[in-house]
Image (spheres, rainbow, N blue to C red):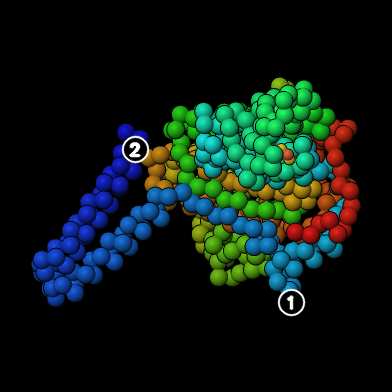
Amino acid sequence: MKSVYSNFLRLSTLCLLGVLLLCTAAGLLFNVKLLPGGLSRSMLLLPAALILFWGYRRYSSPLELLRSLEEVGYIPEPGCSRLQTVNQVRYRRKKGDLPPVYPNGWYRLLDSHLLLRGELKNITLLGEQVALYRTQEGQVYVVDAYCPHLGANLAVGGQVVGNCIECPFHGWQFNGEDGKCTKIPYAVKVPEFAKIKTWPSCEVNGMICIWYHSDGLAPTWSIPEQEEITSKEWVYRGRTEHYVGAHIEEIPENGADIAHLSQVHGPCAISGVDLRYTNSKLWKFVKHTWKVQWQPEPEPNNHCSQMFLEHALTLFGKHFALLDLHVIARQVGPGLVFMTFKHDFLGSGVILLCVTPVEPLLQRVSHSIYYQENMITAIPKFILWVECKQFERDIMIWNNKKYVSKPLLIKEDSAVQRHRHWFAQFYSENSPRLVFQQQGLDW
Ligand code: FES
Ligand SMILES: [Fe+2]
């Protein structure tokens, strides 16, 4: 029942495509005059078939919006390229009295479908390089990218052999389970101390995550499974990826910063992402309004917090209750957010919002949407697109702001202070701090 809609759409598109191709073939081969004008008119059916096929592929494939750092959130400086602007802003910006840069917790590395069996990838996160690979049996392992022998990058030219990863330089093999070296092609015996660092990892909700703790502690909590994703009741409909030039804590803190919602996210999404123009008169007749509450969860889920968000849309000052949307954004640890929504007509689904530090003041942020399968794909894709536009407005603030350790808050901002207190649990004594080096911040 749940896939009746998509099967019907697929079948009807294929039928129409078949008819168009048959008509074209008949016109070309037998000069059958299916359309007035004969052969030349029949040939017009071919581009029509191709356009139909292209349109169907566009419609049914997941949305992918991947943005580089310089594409979003910077105002180009006169005479500078986008990249030069980014480097200048990052170089001269006041950094403020920053908290430690890598909080303890689980972080997303990659969406599961982007790592095939036998595939190997090099990923930068937390100021480190890791090699991520999937065995032929489907198991995922994460190890340090640099070989302890002479430093080659295992993910650049290396290969997956059974449970092991083989270095491209001298052929040493390391087991992803415990990091032990299992083979040195030119040695009689593999010494006991030959080992590579492994990272605790897990695969859940269609993504591969790794655990980081500055003291090397094992995971103290696990990532909750979204059952609708595992059971395929909700299916993948697209993803976005952005880079944000800010401290990681700025991003989740946004959920507790209630006052910014009407200022930054009030203007309609179509009015763009450049905050200089979002309040243009042209789009004044559409407005988003938000009501938000933020609160931490009690033990044993004190590593989680929840934001309850009620969204309403007004057109010419008139409220359309049909478009009201209730969202629960559950923050799980420092780097994962589950935004679930339910709507009587628009259906239900989840956006997995993941923030992964690449380096101290650079975050990779992904949004992946999973939605009930029997809903037309345009709905989840549109929701993801709107979320993406609203998020890009925040990026413009984050990329240019300074972290204020002692902010000037008023009573109405109290959730910001409570959020900072809650977030502090993810730092420990040895959490690394930014060593200030202006020349080290170039992108
Ligand atoms: S550097 Fe990896 S085996 Fe030599
Ligand atoms: Fe925001």
**Marking on residue 49:** none
User: Residue 5: in sight, yes or no?
Assistant: yes
From the top left corner, tell me how far across and down residue 6 is, in percent: 33, 43
| Labels 1 and 2: the sequence-earlier one | 2
The amino acid type of the residue labelled 2 equals Ser
- In the foreground, 124 or 189: 189
Q: In the structure shown, which secondary structural element does the residue marked by tag 1 occupy?
A: loop
- In the foreground, 125 or 6: 125
Q: Which residue has dot 1 on it?
A: 78
**At 77% from the left edge and 22% from the top edge, which residue is drawn?**
192
Q: Is residue 244 placed above or below 105 in the rendered structure?
A: below
Image quadrant occupied by the N terminus = top left
Task: Name the quadrant where ligand 1 sits.
Answer: top right
Q: Is residue 352 placed above or below 21 in the rendered structure?
A: above
The amino acid type of the residue labelled 1 equals Pro
Q: Is residue 234 left or right of residue 267?
A: left
Q: Is mark 2 within 8 Å of ligand 2?
A: no
From the top left corner, tell me how far across and down residue 144 is, in percent: 72, 37
Q: Which image quadrant for residue 220?
A: top right
User: Residue 353: in sight, yes or no?
Assistant: no
**Marking on residue 3:** 2
Image quadrant occupied by the C terminus = bottom right
Q: Is residue 275 placed above or below 40 in the rendered structure?
A: above
From the top left corner, tell me how far across and down residue 213 is, in percent: 78, 32
Q: Is residue 410 left or right of residue 389?
A: right
**At 62% from the left edge and 30% from the top edge, which residue is drawn?**
164
**At 72% from the left edge and 25% from the top edge, which residue is drawn?**
188
From the top left corner, tell me how far across and down residue 375 is, in percent: 39, 43
Q: In the structure shown, which secondary structural element does the residue marked by tag 2 occupy?
A: loop
